[in-house]
Amino acid sequence: MTAVREELRRNPIRSPWIFGCGVVLVAVALLLGYGLIVLGVAILIPTAVAVAQRPQRGVIIFAALLPFDGILHDLGPAWVIPWKQVVILALLLSTFFCPASARTQFRRQAPGWLLAFAALVALGVFSSL
């Protein structure tokens, strides 16, 4: 993998070549009837890269897509129904693996209400038993 990375640094791929391959792949996908999948991938990849660079963007995108959940339940396939849980877990994981520039530079103190919140959570757990 390191050798491939070094080779790409020495001889970068020229953008017309990438554009040409993309056009050919899109044309083949459209001819084979996979246009919707190509559109989904074309939207998903740049969105995933933007969220990986700054997870706060993912929270905003999630809040913007949440009102359309009912349409997805009515018209979408069954395997898409848990999309909210997948997005939340992806956002949680991306906060741990995001670049250092997306994180705060200084250590924050815990908020003053954290102890009261922990006590209320403990009370709720014990009352459910």
Image: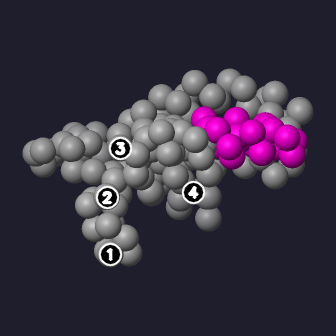
Q: What element does badge 1 sit on?
A: helix
The residue that disc 1 covers is 3
In percent of the image, x 74 and y 31: which residue is there? 69
Query: What's the CA distance linking mark 2 and mark 3?
Result: 25 Å
Which marked residue is nearer to the observer: mark 2 or mark 4? 2
The residue carrying pointer 4 sits among few (fewer than 14), some (14 to 19) or many (20 or more) residues within 10 Å by Cα, namely few
Is residue 72 visible in the rendered image? The answer is yes
Numbered circle sitting on residue 127? 4
Left or right: where 58 falls relative to 36: left
Q: CA distance from mark 3 to mark 1?
A: 25 Å
- Is 43 or 16 nearer to us in this picture? 16
Please state the horizontal and vertical placement of residue 31, each as a whole percent of the image: 85, 41
- Picture residue at 72% right of the left edge, 26% below the top: 68
x%, y% of residue 61? Answer: 53, 30
- Disc 2 is placed on an element classified as loop
Query: On the image, numbered disc 3 is attached to which residue?
Result: 53
Location of residue 58 in the rendering, given as x and y in whole percent from the top left corner: 47, 37
Residue lying farthest to the left in this orientation: 106
Image side of residue 76 versus residue 26, left or right? right
State left or right for residue 120 relative to residue 41: left
Camera-near label (2 vs 1) is 2
Q: Determine which of the numbered discs, if any, sits on residue 45 in the image.
A: none
Q: Earlier in the sequence, mark 2 or mark 3?
A: 2
Between marks 2 and 4, how big is the CA–CA gap?
64 Å
Labelled pair 4, 3 in contact (Cβ < 8 Å): no
Residue numbers of the magenta segment = 23-43
